[in-house]
Every structure is written in C-alpha cells, then in structure tokens.
Image (cartoon, grey):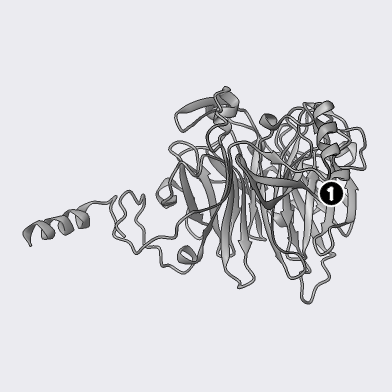
Amino acid sequence: MWGRFFIVLILALTPHAIVSVKLRDVEVIYQWKQLVYGFPTEADRLKAIADGNLVPENGTPIDVAPHQDSNKGSRVFTTIPRFTSGIPYTLALVSDSKESNGPVLQPYPDYSWHNSDGGDCDKITSVFRVAITECNQMFVLDTGVISMVQHCPPQLLVFDLNNDSLLHRYRFEPGTYIAVASLFIVPIVVVDDPPPKGRCRKLRVYIGDVSFHGLVIYDSELNTAWRAENKFMYPDPDHGTHLIAGEKFDLMDGIFGLATDRQQLFFHPLASVSEYSVPLSVINNRTNWLADVNSMTKSFRLVGNRTSQCAAQAMDSYNNLYCVIHNPIKLVRWNMNKPYSVKNEIEIPVDPELLQFVSGMKVFKTDGGKEELWMMSNRFQRIASGTIDFNEVNFRIVRRPLDDIQHGQLKQDLSQRLIFN
C-alpha cells in the first residue's frame, strides 16, 4: 500500500510525468527496403534498364498523398524526385501488389507521362510534392530539373482524380524562377469556392522555392503567378548541420515547410529552428510584388522557435501545426492559439524508428469526417552519408488519427516523458 502511495506521490510531484489513457498508435501503412517499380509491360522494364532509367537504389520517396473517392476508392500517391538518373517515373500510386522489398509502385497517371527523361516538356520531369484539394483535384508541382540540369521550365499540372485526366497546365514565367538555381518543391492550395456550393475555380497555390529562397503565388482566376522574397526564407548557417538518429549531414535548404490556417501562411527553412508567418492578404495582392519581390518586409514575422530543425509540416482544421523535429526525433504539435515556444511544443509519443526524416506530411480527412496525419519517413541521413543498407526498412508511409488530440482526450504535460497506459 505504502509503496503504491509513494509511486503516485512521485508522479504527482514530477513535472515531466503524466498518467494517460491509451494513446493512438502510429500505424505503418507501407514500407520499403528499396523502391519497387512496376511497368506496363516487360518490354518497358527492359528498355528502362537498357537506357539507365531503372536503378532502384537511386530512388527516394519524398511525399505522400492519400485520397478517397467513390469512383476510384482509396488510393495513396507518392513522389520520387529525380535527384539523379535511374528514376523511371517521378509520380506514383502505391499498389496492393508486394515484393520482398515492399509494395509495387505504378506510374501516375500512366507511364507515357514519364518516360522521356526530361526530353519532352509536355510530360512530367521531376516532382517533389503534390497537393490534393477538396475538389478531387491533384496539383502536381514539376520542377523541370534532373540531376541539377534544368531540362524544362517548372510547371503546375492539375489532374482530375475522378478520371485521372489533365485539367490544367501552367508553365511558370522566367520572372518567377531562376533556371537551375530555383527548385520548386512544395505546393499548398487554398480553394476559395469549395464544393458543394462552389465550382473550384477560385484558388491560390503557394509554392516554396527551396534553393533560391522565395515564395511563388499562383492565382487561378488570373492564371498567373508572382514571386515574393524575404530574409526569413533563407537558411540559417547555425542550423545547416542536421543530426538524425545519431548521423550528421549538412544541408543548407531554405523555405521547406508550408502550412496555412487560411488567414496566415506559416513557413520555415529546413536549416532553421524558427517558424515564420505572413498574412495571406499580403501575399495574395499581386500589386505588392510587381515592383520589388522584397517589399512588405514588416508583414513577415517570427512566430517562435523549436528545439530542433524539422522538414515537412501540416496543419489540421483545429489549427494544430505538426512537424517531426530531428534531434531528438519527436512528433510535436503546436496550437496557434498559444505562443509558439518550447514550453508549448507538445510531444506526441511515437517510436522514433518509425519517424526519422519526415519529408512529406498531410492532414487527410476521411469520408467519415475524421482527420488523420499521414507522413512519409525516410532515412535521408543515411542517404546523405552513404550508409544506407537496403537489407533494412528505409522508407515508410505511416498515419495517425488525430481525434484524441483535437477533442482533448490526450492529456499531456509540457514534455510527456513518461506514459502509463
């Protein structure tokens, strides 16, 4: 009796301890040791090998995008940017077929869109991330770059997910990017006229230029884009070295993570521990940027600082912002109703083995209206250091329901070091 009393007393007096109901688990949906590429025919596979376009160990999945539709059912998309050669296609569906290394990928919308290896700018060259809207549309941001060579201008492709056909193509004008220097890697979309009443014709796409440190805004009604720049979009040299799971690598990437509550755009460089914001009303006004891409400096603000760098981020409908910090590996959330500070950086317990370099993150609403956090986790630190072992699991797509967080069922202190189920 007394022993139990003192355990309870110690827990009550320890600021980093909590007692909690059973927590939601992070579920592994797919995992790979090495990417497995499917082809329409065996002849296509053999030709890709002969042309040097199929080198499985060169592929690194970056993004994840789940989708549910009454016509197509449940599908999960991923991207494989062409950092180098040997990538037969850069946008894929995860199929139900499995091999020893993992699930078989299939090219989206079909192989003919990908097999030019940069030789046809009407096809898809290289994609880092995509965005799926409530309009059953997928926005594909094509960099036009393979192995640091600008084969094509960057372009925005919009696919109708009801029938997998191309709805719209926009090629970015030279004033919005610098060939080779720019790299458009992340789009987020805000639809101003969503269904059921709207017609999905009024929307804006916010695009991060990771290497030339800027933000590009595309307006569908104007069918044009403009560029905004700010010092907060640049990497911080003090945070250009990343430590993940005991391995270090240097990566001085600029603006990397984007999220929005439909009022503010939140963003951060990869090489940074800071989160920044700018009102959408400021960046949506094209006239603010026509004369000077560095204007409106006072509209950008520092929101707060994290304990470590993080890559992708996402925001749910309750204004919780999620990211996975690198050192130590933690899934954390911040609610914008509180100051963004270390004490309000709430950890969501998860096995760090499942979440390492989280390069893609989406909040997905199911048909039942519940929200889930989907993440693409890869061992980028091992890819950067050349220590990747293809006998081990290296890439994972995972998800976690958010209802316990959103409805206050997850009772936590500031750091959540000790959990009792």
**Residue 336: image x %, image y %?**
53, 57
Report whether residue 187 is seen: no
Which residue is painted at 45% across and 57% down in the image? 25
**Residue 47: image x %, image y %?**
85, 32
Which residue is painted at 85% across and 65% down in the image? 201
Please tell me in which quadrant of the rendered image residue 165 appears.
bottom right
Please tell me in which quadrant of the rendered image residue 293 appears.
top right
Q: Is residue 70 above or below residue 279?
A: below
- Residue position marked by numbered label 1 in the rendering: 110
Q: Which residue sits furthest front?
A: 42
Which of 70 and 82 lies nearest the eye of the viewer? 70
Please tell me in which quadrant of the rendered image residue 44 appears.
top right
Quadrant in which the C terminus is drawn: bottom left
- Mark 1 lies on a secondary structure that is loop
Which residue is painted at 58% across and 37% down in the image? 33
**Residue 382: image x %, image y %?**
55, 28
**Residue 50: image x %, image y %?**
83, 26
Which of 369 and 298 lies nearest the eye of the viewer? 369
- Name the side, left or right, on which 23 lies relative to 114: left
Report whether residue 110 is seen: yes
Q: Which residue sits furthest top?
A: 386
Q: Which residue sits furthest left?
A: 2
- Name the side, left or right, on which 120 lies relative to 273: right
Which residue is painted at 60% across and 53% down in the image? 314
Q: Amino acid at mark 1?
A: Asp
- Name the side, left or right, on which 308 lies relative to 287: left
- Name the side, left or right, on which 114 lies relative to 320: right
